[in-house]
Image (cartoon, rainbow, N blue to C red):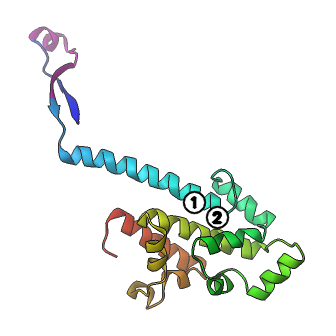
Amino acid sequence: MIREKLTVKPSKAEAATGTFVEQPAARTEASETETASVVKVITREQRLRQERAMFSALLDQSTPPTEMNVVKLVRERLPVRVVDLFFAEGITQQEVNKLVTPRRTLTHRRAKAERLTIDESDRVVRLARVIAQSESVFDDKDKAMRWLRRPMKRFEGRTPIEMLDTDVGSRLVEEALVQIDEGYFV
C-alpha cells in the first residue's frame, strides 16, 4: 500500500508570516501494521453487515431492522414460522423447547394459526441475535454451533446456549463473543 507523506516545514517567508502550506513529499510504502489495520476494519465491517443480514433472515425480515423495529416486531408478536428458520441453522427441537416455548405449545399455535407471545418473541430475538453474532465471529455455522454447545468455565460449566434462557445470560454470551472477535483469550 502506498501512502503520501506530507512535509510541514515552512519556508523562511512562511515562517515569518506564520502561514505555510503542506506539500506532498515522496511516496512511501505503508507499514504492514497500517495495511493490516485497514484490512481488519474492512473485514469487521463486512462481518457486521453479514451479522445484520443473518439476524434479519432469522426474524424473516427482508432488510435488517433497526432496534426500534425489533421492539415493534416483538410487541406485534412474531409468527410461529420464524421458529422453523432456527432449525435450518442447526438449533434442535430440544433447544427451542427450552429457550423459546415447549413443543406442545408451538404445535398448538401452529394449528390455531396463532402468533408467538411477546415473551416468546423476545426469546426468539435473543436467540437470533446470538446465533447471528456467533456465526459472524466464527465465520462458519458449524464452528459457531460447536462453540454454543461447549460447556465453559466462565459460565460455571454451562454451555453458551444454555445461558440464553435469561437476558443477563445472553449478555454474558454476547460479551464473550465480542472478546473472541477482538482477540482476547476467552
As shown in the figure, which amino acid type bears the numbered disc 1? Met
The reply, left or right, for residue 127 in relation to residue 153 is right
The reply, left or right, for residue 122 in relation to residue 11 is right
Name the residue nearer the viewer: 11 or 78. Answer: 78
**Does residue 47 sit above or below 173 in this rendering?**
above
Mark 2 and mark 1: Cα distance apart in space: 6 Å
* Mark 1 surroundings: few (<14), some (14-19) or many (≥20) residues within 10 A: many
The reply, left or right, for residue 114 in relation to residue 37 is right
Q: Residue 44: image x %, image y %?
A: 41, 53
Residue at the image position 22 percent from the left and 16 percent from the top: 21
Q: How many marks?
A: 2
Say which mark, if any, is on residue 58: 2
Q: Are marks 2 and 1 in contact (CB under 8 Å)?
A: yes
Helix, strand or loop status at disc 2 = helix
Q: Residue 28: image x %, image y %?
A: 15, 31
User: Is 172 colored magenta in this rendering?
Assistant: no
Direction left: furthest residue: 12
Magenta segment:
12-27
> Which residue position is annotated with label 1?
54
Q: Quadrant of residue 94?
A: bottom right
The quarter in which the C terminus is drawn is: bottom left
Residue at the image position 19 percent from the left and 38 percent from the top: 30
Name the residue nearer the viewer: 110 or 70. Answer: 110
* Mark 2 surroundings: few (<14), some (14-19) or many (≥20) residues within 10 A: many
Direction bottom: furthest residue: 157
Residue at the image position 64 percent from the left and 53 percent from the top: 66
Name the residue nearer the viewer: 36 or 166. Answer: 36
The reply, left or right, for residue 148 in relation to residue 31 is right
Say which mark, if any, is on residue 171: none
User: Is 23 colored magenta in this rendering?
Assistant: yes
Residue at the image position 19 percent from the left and 15 percent from the top: 18
Q: Quadrant of residue 139?
A: bottom left
